Amino acid sequence: MADSKALTPRAQDFSAWYNELIAKAELADYSPVRGCMVIRPNGFAIWEQMQAALDGMFKDTGHENAYFPLFIPQSFLAKEAEHVEGFAPETAVVTHGGGKELEEPLVVRPTSETIIGSMFSKWIQSYRDLPVLMNQWCNVVRWEMRTRLFLRTTEFLWQEGHTAHATEAEAEEETLKMLGVYRTFQEQYLAIPVITGRKTESERFAGAMRTYALEALMQDNKALQMGTSHNLGQNFAKAFDVSFQTADGAMDHVWSTSWGCSTRMIGGMIMTHSDDNGLVCPPRLAQRQVVIVPIHKTDSERGQVLEAANALATDLKAGGLRVHVDGREGIKPGAKYYEWEARGVPFRLELGPRDLTNRSVMLARRTGGGKVSLGMEGLAATLRGEVDQMQRGLLESARARREGGTLRHPKSKEEFVDYLESGGGFVYAGWCGDPAVEAAVKEQTKATIRVLPDTEFRVGDAPTRCIWTGQPAQYEAVWARAY
Amino acid sequence: MADSKALTPRAQDFSAWYNELIAKAELADYSPVRGCMVIRPNGFAIWEQMQAALDGMFKDTGHENAYFPLFIPQSFLAKEAEHVEGFAPETAVVTHGGGKELEEPLVVRPTSETIIGSMFSKWIQSYRDLPVLMNQWCNVVRWEMRTRLFLRTTEFLWQEGHTAHATEAEAEEETLKMLGVYRTFQEQYLAIPVITGRKTESERFAGAMRTYALEALMQDNKALQMGTSHNLGQNFAKAFDVSFQTADGAMDHVWSTSWGCSTRMIGGMIMTHSDDNGLVCPPRLAQRQVVIVPIHKTDSERGQVLEAANALATDLKAGGLRVHVDGREGIKPGAKYYEWEARGVPFRLELGPRDLTNRSVMLARRTGGGKVSLGMEGLAATLRGEVDQMQRGLLESARARREGGTLRHPKSKEEFVDYLESGGGFVYAGWCGDPAVEAAVKEQTKATIRVLPDTEFRVGDAPTRCIWTGQPAQYEAVWARAY
């Protein structure tokens, strides 16, 4: 049973609210291992829904799943100069195996470009072998000093796609296609509106030619990176000699990509939609979309109502809904409501003796509307409609909130700084392209360039001047403080 | 494209055949990391089918998935005396993280009883919290000196169930229930007949009170352990202080179980069903149950036949079958047949211009029957029937082969030794219960007691004498050489 203590309100302490919510909804827990979390069944069920949806989208775009080793020889990282610089400092290193010191230490994978590159060089000989379109679902480890449940942990679960192509254009097309897949998933399932765009050099994946990302704005106006897609150019192909014979008989290195998103998205979901009563879970990702709470006074009522509740659940399941009957004895209906609310169940059906007589049921929505009595006739269809409506409503609310937390083209450096320092969200402003400016802005405001946004997310004329230096702007950039 | 070299026949060199088959069907590959394998898409797709079936069975029996950390503090292993003795010698140890030496080394999980025990002690307070029924799908690492693809690798994928109960009886019931789930899965999906029973003390899981296992006989008459289910008693509960208040207010330690099966089952599937032409995959686990090969001479034929093949595939998919159209150009039909045969596709449909005219298609079965022409009418239903029939046929063949490789109650020690030393399979014989006998039999014949079989697998009167010592038999045991 969920504990009955109210959450610290978001407005009072967003970080405390976040941690308390995760504990109360039993989504995750701290483990005795530094920086590692336990994903509890309520949290893991959401991840399973996410995996199923994303995996289907990956397969629909021609990708196949595979599995590569957890361990990577330390020397492999060093074969790509930028990659080792970026990842070596945060690796966990196995030095002993089977009671003996290893000749070469093994790194626990922080990401798998290197080991996969080495396999691709074995498998790919000819243009006929291309493209290779693979994905793996796995755990990765990055040694983190400051961790937060779901958002930043030493070990996390993710998927990493890895592909190889005959031409630069095909690799770029793949990189953008998968960015688009992530966007569709995040909008349609997570109900999180994202800005897509390119990362600056300083935020680029270590070893990539270009990194694209999706950025969302949380309720505390901090940005969260929701996923990345990298055009790796020929960098890893050269480091691991992944070469192929072209159609006209020449030899070339492949062009490769990688793209990933992780359990971090669960944190993004919590911080986008949830409220002071607990988790709000978009219905398409909810383990239990509908919970039926039977209401009864006498034992004979109990038998009757429970039977009807189970029959109703069977009907609704046949109608494509994920349904749970909370038939626990010794717990009052009000306590059940409170618990399922904290756990983010989208719809609650209350079913009592009078409802049986009237062939009706009381629907309570977790968000976007109060209680309403519904007829039993066609209830599954009605609820499927409710699922769609809540799903849309959550996306619209989140988009409206993001727009409210976005400043476009501040008139002055002061307005820019002020917005970021006073807890504002995204700022669109011109940037001269100098990394020193990024560093200076970060030093003063703690904000970074989240992306150089794709055209679709730019509104009106592009800024002509850098907001910091007044020099001609090379780019329009989106700044924010970020997780 | 699969390489065109024929496999070494099983009869000539079973081990070479096994390795060549895996390479040819592109199921897995060696990695540059000692003892670690890469599971390639053709192999991983089988694992995905296995996971889906098993996961559904776990959920139907009330289990929920969760995720626990990859790393375990080294001191945790030591809290259960037998456990550390069994597992410490084969662990991989992380000594450095984030560039610094760790205060306490971390073990990469060989199995998760200890870390899960520590979490259960945090979550379980009262009998109301019981039973706890969890499972996780994950990777584990056991440092192996001699590795074989799928059968024994340093890292492997598996699921491990972990449950906690209020009474010893409930824990025993769970242990046997999950053994039964594995058996159902292995018989109904893998089409592998298994013997279930209890392990002797010397083969018991390190830290368990009792270990049950499923054993299958491969085509080379060696046994393969297909999964295990452990009644852990209160051993881990005491080591990690997992205690609870009982219904009448007393305190007690929980009774726990764990059970697991792994990617090793893919190896078992290969060695049970496959032949000298390549993989034979039971249709319920095949990624592609049906491959349609279009046959045409002219370009105009090609367009027509390909269109019909795609339309047919759509129909069959709607009929619940997993179907692939092999429309590759520049590869002759015969080469395609050969490739799909090596990859274990259960059914091939050949579709040519004459078939279009006759509204028919040619069916070729991977096993259990030759070619036959079928009408298009009701083809999906016909093929679903073929799936069931092949599935049953594989199980029956494997059972007949196992029975042919089983000796029940040899008359003498000589007959017993002779059978084991001459490449026989399972031997049922009496055992006095002395571990020294197990050791002596192993020393002489390389055979071990696979299980003390459940009643169902015993036939006729139990042996009264130990086959080795002539002393009164305590048990009927099943011996074999094993992987």
Image (spheres, coloured by chain):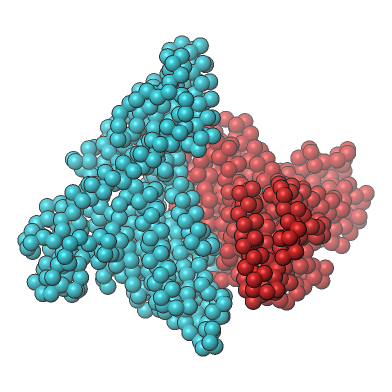
Chain colours: A cyan, B red
- The reply, left or right, for residue B279 in relation to residue A381 is right
- The reply, left or right, for residue B377 in relation to residue A235 is right
Compared with residue B341, is residue B193 higher up or lower down, i.e. above or below? above
Residue at the farthest right position: B411
Residue B117, how many percent across, how many down? 49, 43
Q: Residue at x 44, y 49 (%)?
A: A50
Q: Residue at x 53, y 44 (%)?
A: B135
Q: Quadrant of the C terminus of chain A?
A: bottom left
- Count how many numbered circles sit on residues in the image: 0
Q: Residue at x 19, y 74 (%)?
A: A474
Q: In the depicted view, which residue is nearer to us: B355 or A378? A: B355
Task: State which quadrant residue B354 falls in.
Answer: bottom right
Residue A331, how many percent across, how many down? 41, 22
Residue A247, how many percent across, how many down? 54, 83
Q: Quadrant of the N terminus of chain A?
A: top left
Q: Is residue A404 visible?
A: yes
Q: Residue at x 58, y 50 (%)?
A: B51
Q: In the depicted view, which residue is nearer to us: A383 or A410? A: A383
Q: In the depicted view, which residue is nearer to us: A274 or B100? A: A274
Residue A24, how many percent across, how many down? 34, 37
Compared with residue A417, is residue A28 higher up or lower down, i.e. above or below? above
